Image (cartoon, rainbow, N blue to C red):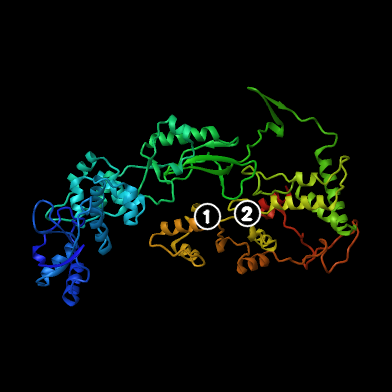
Amino acid sequence: MELKFVDPRALKDNPDKARRSKSSPQADALLLATIRAVGIVQPPVVALETEGGNGYVIDAGHRRVKQAIAAGLEEIAVLVIDRAEDGGAMRSLAETLAHEQLNPVDQWRAIERLVALGWTEEAIAVALALPVRQIRKLRLLANVLPAMLDQMAKGDMPNEQQLRTIASASLDEQKEVWKKHKPSKADPQVSWWSVAQGLTKRRMYARDASFGDDLARAYGIAWVEDLFAPADEDSRYTTDVEAFLGAQQEWMANTVPKRGVIVEAAQWGEPKLPPKAERVYGKPSKSDHTAMYLDREGKVQSVAYRMPAAKKPRGENGADVVTDGDDIVVAAKPRPDVTRKGIEMIGDLRTDALHEALSRAPIGDDTLMALLVLAFAGQNVAVASGARDISYYGAAGLGEHAARLFDHDGKLEFDMDTLRIAVRSLLIDVLSCRENRSDSGVVARVAGDVIAADNFLANMGTEDFLSCLSRQALEAACADTSVPPRQKVKDTRAALVEHFKEGRFVHPSALFAPAPEKLTSWLKKNEARKQPDDDTPQHQDELDGDAVVEPAHDDVGEDSAPREEDLADEQIEPYKVAAE
């Protein structure tokens, strides 16, 4: 190596220089100002001509020599070195990168030159301190149409996503698209978005596949690695969409659960559930069904749903219908020993006695709890349960909770543990916060607040739930996290889903504590009203059944109730309903 002072105008450009695209005017102006102020700090590197000339060829420092000429310098210092085996290709590239980053086209051309001179991708990566994946990614530019490369070398570069799409297409496809979108004098800029859009093919990724290698081979799926994707994810993909979806369908058919079905996706990607099916967003029960389907990206998704119970057919006069194959047999009810009127009289007498005992008889606390379970098991109690299948007009039967309180002899006998289990299971069947006819209202919210059910709420940081939130709500959800709001709502939602994948997010509106105004309104609506113990007017003494009771008003000569002939038709109807 030798330091010499030469006229910069006598130096010759290297035809194989690393940087071929023009640098920005701002960078050239800054370099010129520096040379005028302090001169050239680092001398350019030159070598003797190899084809018999006496001049020097620039190995590194073309921009410095050019700006030195522009600054009017008569001579500059240069470092004269011997030519390397690769003609100084690696040294030129490394020094050029150290001064100013090359655009991808120049980097690719320099790397291809090194490969032609015998350098391996691993050796180039070590010498340039770059990942091997980056070297392979740049070499993909060899798949780009030369006319596009020339345009990119002028500084008109597509973004990485567009470049990835262009490089993955064949040269014939690129030629056809380039004819439509190549620059003109009127519009020298290329719409790389339009170019990439014309070459876009739908990709199905291996990370979204539920099937294994055996089905992939059976359907002839060949995975291609996307070298432009992040290195820490499975970037294999295929453009054979039909084969991918066929393998997914076969995998679903082989793995569908016992109470599961395979359904199609609707226009917006939601599953098409069977008619009258109600989707279950919470924890599914054993009696619920599962619907498997493919979403827009070809992923296998599953949702739980429940069907209403089938209505039992009835014959004439309430007789049960027994089906046997294609024949239907109507089993007539036998005549009871006691007439209907007698049964109604017995029912009235029993009810009066039961109510009297409940009011006055001594009852222990454990027995009271057991009787409450029995009361909910009564056939006059209609509970639209949120925990089991129910018919649209019917209600869940709660007798199973009371049945566990009886012994083998049919007597009410239990221990406290059994009673606690029965009460808990009964409350599970009765209390519901679902947005359908099983909703218990504000009382279920109060119950959940009392027992701290907020701690049992599932993670709501999912795509399904976050898609139901507005932009303001999504940005508010970012407040207590390290996720900053994005410009696009879908980007914010995706970032939150990734953030809460291993954590737990509960939206404030999902907490159990009801709003104070709702609770106050419910309490006022259900405020207990004081009523007399019986139907006897307060200012009259209780009389025996044979006595004549005078009307409780001043009109002694008139009946206390209106007569039927004095009422209109619309006034008679309520009395008939009450009588029934």
Q: Is residue 296 left or right of residue 42?
A: right
Q: Is residue 242 left or right of residue 185?
A: right
Q: Find residue 439 and name its label.
A: 2
Q: Eyeballing the image, is 523 above or below 312?
A: below
How far across and down, in percent of the image, does residue 82 sit? 20, 57
Residue 90: percent from left, percent from top: 25, 54
Depth check: give the residue in front, 523 or 344: 523
Residue drawn at (57%, 50%) of the image: 281
Q: Secondary structure at mark 1?
A: loop
In the rendering, at what x and y percent does residue 205 appear? 41, 43
Residue 145, visible in the rendered structure: yes
Give me the residue at 81% from left, 44% from top.
Answer: 344
Asked if one can make out residue 468 in the rendered structure from this viewpoint, the answer is: no
Left or right of residue 352, residue 147 in this image: left
The residue identified by callout 1 is 501
Looking at the rendered structure, the kind of residue marked 2 is: Asp
- Which mark, by number, is residue 324? none
**Which residue occupies the extreme front position in the image?**
2
Categorize mark 2 by other alpha carbons within 10 Å: few (<14), some (14-19), many (20+). Answer: some
State which quadrant residue 76 falls in. Answer: bottom left
Describe residue 373's horizontal placement relative to residue 462 as left or right.
Answer: right
Q: What separation in Å lies between label 1 and label 2 (alpha carbons)?
A: 30 Å
In the rendered view, tell whether residue 57 sits above or below residue 322. below
- Please, which residue is most extreme toward the bottom here? 37
